[in-house]
Image (cartoon, helix red, strand yellow):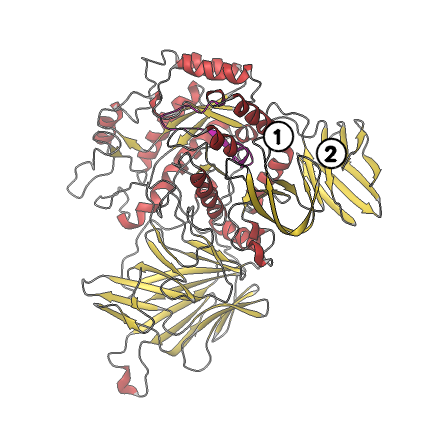
Amino acid sequence: MKFTDGYWRKRDGLTVLHPVQLQDTSAGTTSLTAYASAKRVQGRGDTLDAPIITVELSAPAPDVVRVSISHFAGAQRRTPEFEIFAEPDFRPEISSRSLVSGALTARFAEGDAWGLEFRAGGKRLTRSGWKGMGVVDTADGEHYVHEQLDLGVGEAVYGLGERFGPLVKNGQTVDIWNEDGGTSSEQAYKNVPFYLTNRGYGVLVDHPGKVSFEVGSELVGRTQFSVAGQSLSYLVIYGPTPADILRKYTALTGRPALPPAWSFGLWLTTSFTTSYDEETVTSFVDGMAERDLPLSVFHFDTFWMREFSWCDFEWDARIFPDPPGMLKRLHDRGLRTCVWINPYIAQRSSLFAEGMRAGYLVRKPDGDVWQWDRWQAGMALVDFTNPEACAWYAGKLRTLLEMGVDAFKSDFGERIPLEVVWHDGSDPERMHNYYTQLYNKVVFDVLREHRGEGEAVVFARSATVGGQQFPVHWGGDNSSTYESMAESLRGGLSLAASGFGFWSHDIGGFEGLPDPAVFKRWIPFGLLSSHSRLHGNQTYRVPWLFDSEAVDVLRSFTRLKNSLMPYLFAAAERAHHEGLPVMRPMVFGWPDDPAVTHLDRQYLLGDSLLVAPVFSESGETSYYVPAGRWTRYLTGEIVEGPGWVHETHGFDGVPLLVRPDSVVPVGARVDRPDYDYRDGITLRLFEPAEGSRTVTVAGSTFEVTRQGATVRVTRSGAALPWQVQAGDTVVAVAAGETGCELTLP
């Protein structure tokens, strides 16, 4: 939201107060409060009609400073609020002008001039300076508070949720407001008022409702964020690296649960509006098996329920007469199953009257149930602020789990109305974005309760701050084009920079029928993502409907992903424990390399693999390789960095490079993602450097030490056979043996 007309003038109809002169500070045991007047005070008479802006500093954890700005403090407390996991015993160092939180210092300017700067590592990270903070009144009686933080030369901003435009947000206006807008617009399903920069810090605006960001747009040298009301609170998080920032951010807002290993395999769906029944499903599963295509999960999309009845959580008996038997037959073939759900109750659903009687549906101020005809005729919305409604909804899901369903695709959750009354009195503006958090928590919790820790997984579309706790999220409704493939990747990388550890997308695109070339190019990108799903709208996504080469490409990359599961699951465990996403923008690996700042057509998969999807039928592509001797994973060829690589790939290839000094654990199975990774594992060594490093796989720890041309590998843990590979040299180690040695060529 813009408040200025150029650099000096305010927009017509606005009255804006800025802190001008620091009048006083008050230091407590846990906070430092500053009182700044909105005009200069030279004498006692100047204190009359002089508004005061109050700025309080506190620290919920080391290296984190909370800034709370307020004008009028008499407003009632509004809910919901983001859940911030503070360290209750942490105490910052406080003086009359500064608050020190670990390595991060927030300091008010000396003298009576106004300013607030943030310092760490011996340098200024950012600053709120002249006219940075502002309290805005409009001619219509609306009120806003804004803050502006300086952007340094070359400083790049990342995050703000899953956004499909350029990865670097500089120059963009971003409104944090969940919408069902597809992947080709400025709207987003997953809006997160958090960003990080390559200057060593991140910022979380602690407001679950609408937050408007002007990232080097209204003022090109500042990031501005604003909210409605008389107060604004934000947290500055010091890294110094992007990975460090996310570790601390996810410690505050929640780390992702660890998805089950089976969920990393290939998912196949019925697609959305296609015609299907059990015979269709069986033919798809048979077709995959006959073509030796490893399949892990089969998903039933919306029409597993009867039309006009979503959601009643009842199988459409006309096309699925024996759901328990069908689910058992799929389980007997080694498959998991997933069904589509959303938080809406159509009027025709048997649950509508039940929910209305019990008060489980969101109501309007006049007491009527809120309804509309978009999506489902007369649909209502489950009120997840009502604990009894949560239990009711969870009970319907539990029945499906007891029947044999393994996972839920928790779709929608963005179209949340404002003209409603919530059971717990929540503010409608704040609930609009936050609703998805309550919805997905209910779904994830019932899965975790029924299936056990480490066995719960959803396929969610909407999210806000904290939503990363309930994986997996997918990118929503993309299209069957190379352009949409690229925008999907930008969205995934933007979401990763917002603290989400696991992400997927519809291989081949959701809207339209992909050209066989598009489908085949999308497959490597899909299988080299944390989670992989074949899904469409009006057309199926089984590969033999495209051409025989599509079958071969899918087989090759599905088998490749399954073999990489020891490596990928280790990355997943790191996401679970540290908050570092499995898929990451390149800046996470090389924050000091200016060449990677804007790269959004390639990414890191874990710590060691660089993936550069191909976005053309011809196979022509360009990508950047950072410094060092990189190895092509599929061929063993060496690529020297730093520099740009221009090359052409067939449909059976993709740029997949291994970082120098990497140890990539490779599994012995290619037919499934869930197996004992320790049994028959191969440690592939790539350009090992002098010294030692360790790799842990499923509880077994391997230490790799290089001295000159000699590499020694030792293992602790399970007594199972394993081997080590460096280039063409392979050394097998028998079960029970704890080490081996090899000589590098």
Q: Residue at x 75, y 45 (%)?
A: 688
Kind of residue indicated by mark 1: Leu
Local SS, label 2: loop
Judge by depth and name the residue closer to the eye, 592 or 682. 592
Task: Determine which of the numbered discs, if any, sits on residue 560 in the image.
Answer: 1
**Residue 672 coordinates in the image, percent (x, y):** 59, 24
Q: Residue at x 27, y 70 (%)?
A: 10
What residue is shown with label 2? 717
Q: Which stretch is magenta?
A: 523-543
Judge by depth and name the residue closer to the eye, 567 or 71. 567
726 sits to left or right of 370:
right
**Residue 387 coordinates in the image, percent (x, y):** 33, 37
Kind of residue indicated by mark 2: Gly
**Residue 46 coordinates in the image, percent (x, y):** 28, 84
Residue 541, magenta (yes or no): yes
Work out which quarter of the rendered image holds the C terminus and state it: top right
